[in-house]
Image (spheres, grey):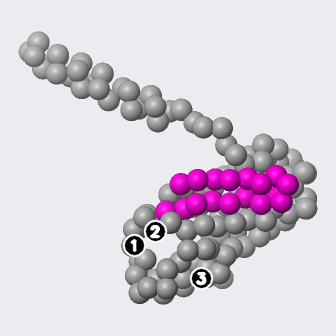
């Protein structure tokens, strides 16, 4: 009985380190004037890196695909269900909307298949209304 308790305690200590490290969040490079809801990326991608160029008003993501696809099917998926960024003010009034399709992704291979973990780059030019924006919501919608 005490051996089981010791093993349980040891495993709890070993797993506590990584769990605690996962709880740490790096400071977001995104515009601090707004909150960003980017969960729509999670179905297809893992966000590898986010860059924000304040001078150019551009956000750039490096994304890694979660699964492998036939390249043609992946492109069709992005065009059929484009990523839509909606920008809201503090009263949740829509100020601007931007849709991004396959042509907006850099790095889609010309080969027949797109492997899991393929890195793509996506650039979003922020709207002129950005100083008034308090919330940015990313969704996917069917055309």
**Circle 3 or circle 1, nearest the eye:** 1
Q: Which residue is mark 2?
A: 118
- In the image, residue 118 sits, relative to residue 23, either above or below, namely below
Which sits in the foreground, 140 or 13? 13
- Could one spot residue 14 in this view of the protein? yes
Residue at mark 3 to residue at mark 1: CA–CA distance: 20 Å
Q: Position of residue 125 (x, y in %)?
A: 79, 65
In the rendered image, the residue lying farthest to the top is: 2
Tell me the tag on residue 11.
Answer: none
Boundaries of the magenta span: 48-65
Q: Is residue 137 left or right of residue 3?
A: right
Indicate the secondary structure of the residue bearing disc 1. Answer: loop
Say whether residue 113 is magenta: no
Which of pointers 2 and 3 indicates the residue nearer the eye? 2
Residues at marks 2 and 3, CA–CA distance in whole angstroms? 20 Å
Query: Secondary structure under badge 3?
Result: helix
Q: Position of residue 96 (x, y in %)?
A: 84, 65
Residue 101, by quadrant, is bottom right
Image vertical order of residue 86 relative to residue 3, above or below: below
Instruction: Find the distance from the CA under tag 1 to the CA under tag 2.
Output: 6 Å
Query: Image point 50% across, 57% down: which residue?
Result: 46
Q: Residue at x 61, y 74 (%)?
A: 106
Does any portion of residue 77 appear in the rendered image? no
Disc 1 target residue = 115
The residue beneath circle 3 is 80
């Amino acid at each position: 009985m005490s051996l089981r308790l010791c093993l349980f305690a040891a495993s709890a200590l070993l797993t506590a380190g990584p769990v605690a490290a996962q709880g740490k969040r790096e400071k977001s490079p995104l515009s601090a004037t707004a909150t960003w809801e980017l969960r729509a990326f999670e179905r297809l991608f893992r966000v590898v890196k986010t860059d924000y160029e304040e001078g150019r008003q551009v956000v750039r993501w490096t994304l890694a695909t979660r699964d492998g696809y036939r390249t043609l099917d992946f492109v069709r998926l992005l065009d059929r269900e484009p990523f839509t960024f909606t920008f809201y003010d503090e009263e949740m009034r829509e100020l601007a909307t931007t849709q991004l399709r396959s042509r907006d992704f850099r790095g889609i291979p010309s080969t027949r298949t797109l492997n899991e973990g393929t890195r793509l780059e996506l650039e979003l030019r922020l709207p002129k209304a950005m100083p008034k924006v308090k919330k940015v919501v990313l969704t996917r919608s069917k055309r």
